[in-house]
Amino acid sequence: MRESRSGKASCQQYSGLYSSMSKVMVSLPEDLLAELDAEAERRSTSRSAFLAAAARRELARPDSERVAAAIARSEQRFDDAGTFEAADLVRNDRDSRR
């Protein structure tokens, strides 16, 4: 690996790897770091690869505020729909197809 002018370490592109990496410093509680290292070792991967995968997984998750807003919109639609009897809906649908 060699360092580029931007301070990023440059490496060849292999499948799934990137051509440049940035180094970061993070502060973690020692017990969390020990657990993280043990899990990375169990999975036969590096700490960096394990943290990168965890970050990608977290970033791919839906935003909890957006999910909560979508649930609130759905609940409002149900409230606006009023009450109904499921058997009547099924019967009406069946009868409309005859």
Image (cartoon, rainbow, N blue to C red):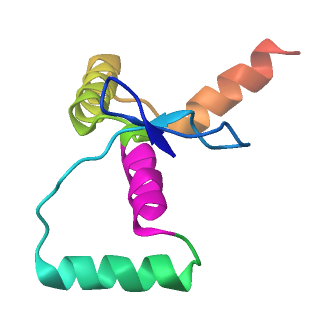
In magenta stretch: residue 71: no
Is 90 situated left or right of 85 in this image? Answer: right
Identify the residue at horizontal 46%, vertical 76% (top origin): 40
Is 89 situated left or right of 52 in this image? Answer: right
Identify the residue at horizontal 11%, vertical 62% (top origin): 27
Is 35 situated left or right of 87 in this image? Answer: left
The answer to whether residue 81 is above or below residue 41 is above
Please state the extent of the stretch shown in magenta in the rendering. Answer: 46-58
The quarter holding residue 86 reads: top right
Q: Position of residue 15 (x, y in %)?
A: 73, 43
The quarter holding residue 14 reads: top right
The quarter holding residue 19 reads: top right
Q: Position of residue 23 (x, y in %)?
A: 30, 46
Report the number of discs. Answer: 0
In magenta stretch: residue 52: yes
Identify the residue at horizontal 67%, vertical 36% (top origin): 13
Identify the residue at horizontal 36%, vertical 80% (top origin): 37
Front position in the image: 13 or 7: 7
Q: Residue furthest right?
A: 98
Front position in the image: 83 or 19: 19
> Quadrant where the C terminus lies?
top right
Is 67 situated left or right of 47 in this image? Answer: left
Q: Position of residue 8 (x, y in %)?
A: 36, 34
Q: Position of residue 51 (x, y in %)?
A: 38, 59
Q: What secondary structure is the stretch in magenta mostly built from?
A: helix
